[in-house]
């Protein structure tokens, strides 16, 4: 995190957080997301309820301090972008919980965002669901 000092220079400060025990972290991740944090969108004739990637990130900050997201690969396969990523959550017990996911997006999608960006955010949401966060949305 950058912090501006009194003399106008910028210095990096450490971000402090407390790791939590594995069982507590997993229980907290499994709690449903408050419906006020969810959005809906039309896809064809269906209305889908989803949680935006930035809201997932905020929930991870609170429920799984120290979490890390890594995009492991981005590939073009048959007219789509395929993203593979891994969510890592450290715990106070010394465990590193790893959740890997894959998501794809057609290159010619209706989205205004780049296909790789859409696939990466979907990949994060899927990895978080594997950890229990927002799993209720995948019914």
Image (cartoon, rainbow, N blue to C red):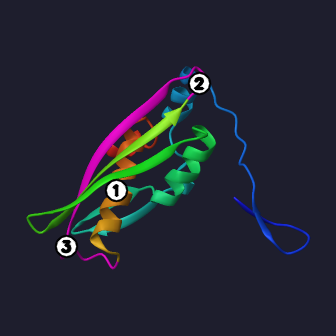
Q: Residue furthest bottom?
A: 112
Identify the residue shown where x is 18% and y is 76%.
108
Q: Secondary structure at mark 2?
A: helix
Other-residue count near label 1 (Cα within 10 Å), few / some / many at <14 / 14–19 / ≥20: many
Q: Is residue 100 magenta?
A: yes
- Label drawn at residue 24: 2
Other-residue count near label 2 (Cα within 10 Å), few / some / many at <14 / 14–19 / ≥20: some
Give the alpha-carbon distance from disc 1 to disc 3, as whole Å: 15 Å
Residue 62, by quadrant, is top right
Q: Is residue 90 magenta?
A: no
Q: Quadrant of the N terminus?
A: bottom right
**Image coordinates for residue 74, horizontal then vertical, percent:** 26, 59
Identify the residue shown where x is 54% and y is 32%.
90
**Image coordinates for residue 61, horizontal then vertical, percent:** 60, 46
Q: Earlier in the sequence, mark 1 or mark 3?
A: 3
Residue 139 appears in the rendering: no
The residue segment tinted magenta is 91-112
Q: Is 34 located above or below residue 48 in the figure?
A: above
**Image coordinates for residue 88, horizontal then vertical, percent:** 46, 38
- Label drawn at residue 107: 3
What residue does disc 1 label? 122
């Amino acid at each position: 995190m950058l912090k501006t000092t009194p003399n106008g220079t910028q210095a990096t400060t450490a971000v402090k957080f407390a790791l939590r025990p594995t069982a507590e972290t997993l229980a907290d991740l499994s709690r449903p997301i408050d419906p006020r944090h969810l959005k809906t969108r039309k896809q064809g004739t269906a209305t889908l309820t989803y949680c935006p990637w930035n809201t997932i990130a905020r929930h991870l900050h609170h429920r799984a301090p120290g979490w890390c997201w890594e995009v492991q690969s981005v590939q073009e396969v048959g007219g789509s972008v395929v993203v593979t990523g891994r969510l890592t959550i450290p715990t106070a017990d010394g465990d590193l919980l790893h959740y890997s996911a894959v998501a794809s997006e057609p290159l010619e999608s209706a989205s205004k965002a780049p296909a790789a960006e859409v696939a990466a955010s979907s990949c994060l949401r899927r990895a978080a669901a594997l950890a229990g966060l927002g799993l209720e949305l995948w019914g």
